[in-house]
Image (cartoon, rainbow, N blue to C red):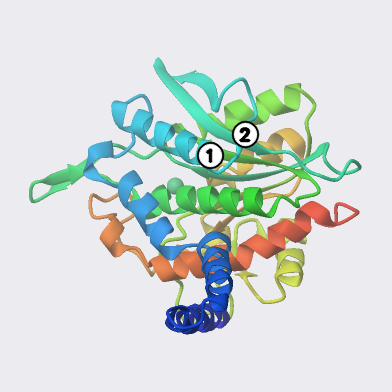
Amino acid sequence: MKNSLFKLTAVLFAAFFLACNSTQDKNSDDATAQETEIASFEASEAKIEENLRFLASDELQGRATGTEGIEKAATFIEEYFQEHDVEPYFEDYRDRFEVEGKEAFNVVGFLEGNDPELKDEFIIIGAHYDHIGFGEAVGNDSIANGANDNAAGTVAVMELARKFALKENNGRSILFVLFSGEELGLTGSEHIAKKLKAENLDLYAVVNLEMIGIPMQGKDHMAYLTGYENSNFAEKLNEYAGEKVLGFLPQAKEYKLFQRSDNYPFFEEFNIPAQTISTFDFTNYEYYHHVSDEADNMDFQHMTNLIDAVFPAIFKMTNTEEKEIKLN
Ligand SMILES: [Zn+2]
């Protein structure tokens, strides 16, 4: 609510300057500055939609690990990182591994922290970008596009990476990780969690994003956190955000969602707060692993609002003197 009102105000403000342009030359610089500010810093709903529509398009054939479709997705994410000054963490953007005899790769972007005291501490912002490929046909459609699962989380990570790179003010370092092999049993996150543990990475926390494309109804919070009671993560994140972004979903506990996404291997390896943010509540979307999990069903405004709410909170996380988020 707050965000969209702000956006509307900003757009009207820019429109006012544009309208003044033709007669008052001195205002044109202000107008340009204002437009750039709007275009660059706020989460861009249009960009989020464009990225999601590509990742969930039929051309990518459901992004199954080891296929040409996921190769295209990876290339797309790499080019996006490059374009927005997000560096590779390893020799290139790919963290390669093998699963079921298939070549697989996580895509990893890196933003070094700018605080000499804090930059050796890392936060991971992640989402899986693979999906299941094909599903049971409905009519002549058999491509499981995986828009909500998890092109939605993927574009959120891409957008957060863009915003952090632009802000250039994260004290702690950040890894943006798009996991492959999730649908084959969390294999990508398991691989990289072990690899980072072996290099003794000082990992503070993991924020994973899963199925955030559809809003929940009738809640006093925007999203829920898996493993809610394991840590003070939700409480601190809400405090940093200045609003109730995260809450508890009983079904998440009942179905053990904490153990079922890419946060879990990091919890196991590092014993740190590693949790998933989601807005899929088992009642608001009927196309989980279904060929109708398509871009047209996504709520892009909801996604934009959630990204705008989470960004300042994670930003704060990168800059607190102490690691304030802790396991209970
Ligand atoms: Zn998923």
Provide the secondary structure element on which disc 2 rests: strand
Near-viewer residue (308 or 324): 308
Binning the other alpha carbons within 10 Å of mark 1 as few (below 14), some (14 to 19) or many (20 upward) gives many
Residue shown at 60% from the left, 54% from the top:
163
Q: Earlier in the sequence, mark 1 or mark 2?
A: 1
Counting from the top left corner in percent of width and height, residue 98 is at: 47, 18
From the top left corner, tell me how far across and down residue 288 is, in percent: 34, 54
Ligand 1 within 8 Å of the CB at mark 1: no
Q: Residue furthest top?
A: 101
Query: Does the rendering let one see residue 110?
Result: yes
Residue occupying image coordinates x 17% and y 43%: 142
Using the image as rendered, state which of residue 79 and residue 218 is in the foreground: 79
**Mark 1 and 2 residues: CB-CB less than 8 Å, in contact?**
yes
Q: Identify the residue shown where x is 48% and y is 84%.
A: 16
Q: What SS does tag 1 mark?
A: helix
Q: Is residue 326 visible?
A: no
In this figure, which residue is indicated by the disc labeled 2? 87
* Image coordinates for residue 224, horizontal then vertical, percent: 58, 65
Q: Is residue 244 left or right of residue 307?
A: right
Q: Amino acid at mark 2?
A: Glu
Instruction: Classify residue 328 as left or right of residue 243.
Output: right
What amino acid type should be assigned to the residue bearing mark 1?
Phe
Q: Which residue in the protein does label 1 denote? A: 81
Q: CA distance from mark 1 to mark 2?
A: 7 Å
